[in-house]
Amino acid sequence: MGVLVTGGAGYIGSVAVEDLTNRGENVVVLDNLVYGHREAVPNDVPFYEGSIGDKQLIAKIVAEHDIDACMHYSAYAYVGESVNSLEGIESVVSGNPPVLQDAYTTGDLRIGLDGDAWGASFFVDNVWDERAELFVSNRWAVQRVSVNPPRTYGLQFRFNF
C-alpha cells in the first residue's frame, strides 16, 4: 500500500515513517522542513520538500507513487505560533495569506466605591463603540472574523471574604 506521510521529517512523522517502512509499506514523505529534518527520513524513502497546500505537488506525488492513504503529521509545533502569529500562516486548502487589520483604539471607564469588605462600581467598556476586526482567518477555506465587543454598560458588586 502506498502511504503519503505529510510532516514525515518531524519527530512524530519520522517515527510513523519508520514504523510503516518496517511493516513493508511503500512510504513517501512530504515536508516543508520548517521544523522537520531531512536526516530524519531514510534515504530509501522518496522525499519531497514542499507545502501541503501545493495541490499540483500533491497530485504529482499521488500519481507517481500510487498513494492509497495519507497520514497527516504536518503542523506548526508551538501553540502560540499556530494561534497568535500571522507569520507563515496560510490556508491549507486555498493558499490564501492572512489579512492584516488596521489599528483601533477603545476606551474603558470605571467608577466605584470601596468599603472594607465590599465594593460596587459602574463601568462602560468600549466607550466610543469602536468596531474593529481583531483577526481574519481563511484557514480551512472558511473565512472567520473575530471582532471586539461593542459598547457595554454594567454594574459590578463584590464582597471580600
Image (cartoon, rainbow, N blue to C red):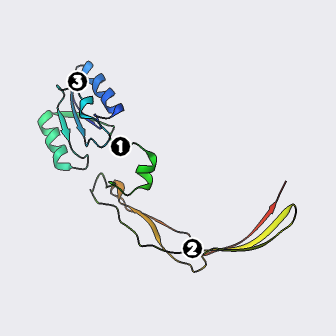
Residue at numbered disc 3: 25
Q: Residue at x 78, y 72 (%)?
A: 112
Which quarter of the figure has residue 10?
A: top left
Q: Residue at x 85, y 53 (%)?
A: 161
Marks 2 and 3, how far apart at CA? 56 Å
Residue 142 or 135: which is nearer the viewer? 135
Which of the two discs, 2 and 3, labels the residue nearer the N terminus?
3
Residue 44 point in image, percent of width and height: 16, 25
Residue 37 point in image, percent of width and height: 27, 35
Tell me the tag on residue 75.
1
The 10 Å Cα crowd at callout 2, few under 14, some 14 to 19, many 20 or more, is some
Residue at numbered disc 2: 150
Q: Residue farthest to the left?
A: 64
Give SS at disc 2. Answer: loop
Q: Looking at numbered disc 3 in the image, what kind of residue is underneath it?
A: Glu
The answer to whether 3 is drawn above or below residue 86 in the figure is above
Residue 116 point in image, percent of width and height: 88, 62
Q: Looking at numbered disc 1 in the image, what kind of residue is underneath it?
A: Ala
Give SS at disc 1. Answer: loop
The answer to whether 47 is drawn above or below residue 88 in the figure is above
